[in-house]
Image (spheres, helix red, strand yellow):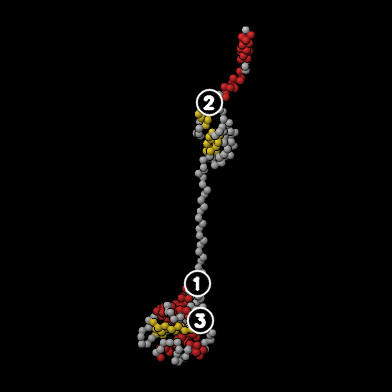
Amino acid sequence: MNKNKAVFYLALVIFLLALFVPFQEVQAFSVTMERERIPVGPSTGDRYQDSPGSPPLLQPAPSQPGTGQAGSGTTQNSYSTPTRTFRSEGTYVPVTPPSNTAPPASLPTAPPPPPAPSPQPPLPLAPSWLTADEAEAFALLNEFRIKNNLPPLQIHYGLTQVARLKAQDMIDHNYFGHVSPTYGSVGQMLRNQGISFTRAAENLSKAGNVNQAHLQLEYSTQGHKQIMLNSNYNYVGIGILPLKKTPGIIMVQLFTD
């Protein structure tokens, strides 16, 4: 009997306690059972789907504009690139797609302009006492020197007179060589004619015209080209006379320092 009374009083206490339970506790419990809303992607407006029975997730604090931190819905970084948020172990994790903004390509630099060629010295004017053939030979000789970066030679009146004597001597005595039966060697002939020098040289050529005579010397393998391009010489004398027995000319070039 005592056992039945104890059960009765225990049931009565439980019933009375149930009557006085605050209504707020029931409401709090029902809030925790509400369905959470999970973002599924950005759109014109934020879009959510229900997830029944899931525990509540921590909501991230709203991000400041331009910081690129996660907030609710769609955020933007400093490049205005949309950022998606995904649920990862009870929180939101921002995932920023790679930016399509590429740094500007550097433009190729233009190569520096080539240095301006140094101006060539002008050809010395042929004096009036030169014949037409001698003036042409004088111009061809200096053009050849200038093309090889050498200064032009100056025409010398005394050397020209000696060159004419040598040309006439070869025609009169029918020989072609550097030693004259009349005047001797080149050095002897120059000294006897009053020409002072420390270096001297002679070129001889026989051809159909002045241009051919010049080319024979320019392309010769016997040292004529080296004489014409010798930087130690400053003066030249040129004597050209027509041949007697055959058509053509004979040319004498005398060089001194």
| 75 or 49, nearer to the observer | 49
Q: Position of residue 205 (x, y in %)?
A: 42, 83
Which residue occupies 50% across, 58% down?
110
Q: Is residue 229 left or right of residue 8?
A: left
Query: In this rendering, which labeled residue sits more in front, label 3 or label 2?
Result: 2
* Residue under pointer 1: 120
* Residue under pointer 2: 53
Sequence-wise, which precedes: disc 3 or disc 1? 1
Which residue occupies 58% across, 33% down?
60
Give the amino acid at mark 3: Tyr
Q: Residues within 10 Å of mark 3 (few under 14, many from 20)?
A: some
Element type where label 2 sits in the image: loop
Sequence-wise, which precedes: disc 3 or disc 2? 2
Q: Position of residue 100 (x, y in %)?
A: 50, 44
Element type where label 1 sits in the image: loop
Sequence-wise, which precedes: disc 1 or disc 2? 2
Above or below 52: residue 10: above
- Give how far apart the Cα atoms at labels 3 and 1 are: 19 Å
Give the amino acid at mark 2: Gly
* Residue under pointer 3: 235
Residue 74 seen in the current view: no
- Give how far apart the Cα atoms at labels 3 and 2 are: 115 Å
| 161 or 42, nearer to the observer | 42
